[in-house]
């Protein structure tokens, strides 16, 4: 049986600038997802998301980013590139870089492919739709 692809939306819905993930989750939750794709509201779960990643064939995270692109531009980052951002920052408040860095050390079984889809700037409707479309495309990519 193939392992599911999981789209994991993270962020704080009550904090403008950190609400991209929750807004993408709300958009996707109201639509029909392709077979084999699961949607997860990761909120502010941090390291608790390790159990959501395990068992996935691919984990596509959605979150706001800073310093990777021009405002409004959608970016795709690989786990290794995000994990490299830890550079000595260790602890629960280190966010996705810390989670992605720990993953190969603590994951039970095979480590799935992990991507981060993000965008910079306010989560305007068009940006939310573009990020959602990219996350879906990555989740179903062969």
Image (cartoon, rainbow, N blue to C red):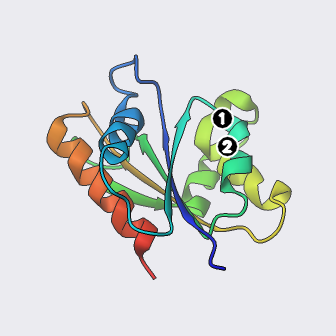
Q: Secondary structure at mark 2?
A: helix
Q: Position of residue 47 (x, y in %)?
A: 72, 38
- What residue is shown at x 61% (from left), y 36% (from top)? 95
- What residue is shown at x 73% (from left), y 41% (from top)? 88
Which of these two is toward me, 102 or 6? 6
* Residue farthest along the top direction in this orientation: 14
Which of these two is toward me, 47 or 86? 47
Is residue 85 positioned above or below 125 on the image? below
Is residue 134 positioned above or below 51 on the image? below
Q: Quadrant of residue 17?
A: top left
Is residue 114 positioned above or below 42 on the image? below
Q: Can the viewer see residue 86? A: no
Give the residue number, with chain letter if any, for mark 1: 46
Q: Position of residue 93 (x, y in %)?
A: 67, 27
Give the residue number, with chain letter if any, for mark 2: 49
Q: Quadrant of the N terminus?
A: bottom right
């Amino acid at each position: 049986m193939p392992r599911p692809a999981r789209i994991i939306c993270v962020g704080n819905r009550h904090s403008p600038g950190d609400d991209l993930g929750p807004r993408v989750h709300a958009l996707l939750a109201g639509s029909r997802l392709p077979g084999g794709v699961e949607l997860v509201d990761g909120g502010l779960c941090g390291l608790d998301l390790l159990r959501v990643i395990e068992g996935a064939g691919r984990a596509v995270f959605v979150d706001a980013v800073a310093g990777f692109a021009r405002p409004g531009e959608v970016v795709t980052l690989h786990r290794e590139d995000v994990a490299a951002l830890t550079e000595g920052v260790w602890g629960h408040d280190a966010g996705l870089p810390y989670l992605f860095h720990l993953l190969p050390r603590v994951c039970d079984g095979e480590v799935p492919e992990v991507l981060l889809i993000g965008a910079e700037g306010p989560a305007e409707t068009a940006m939310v739709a573009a990020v959602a479309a990219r996350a879906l495309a990555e989740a179903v990519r062969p």
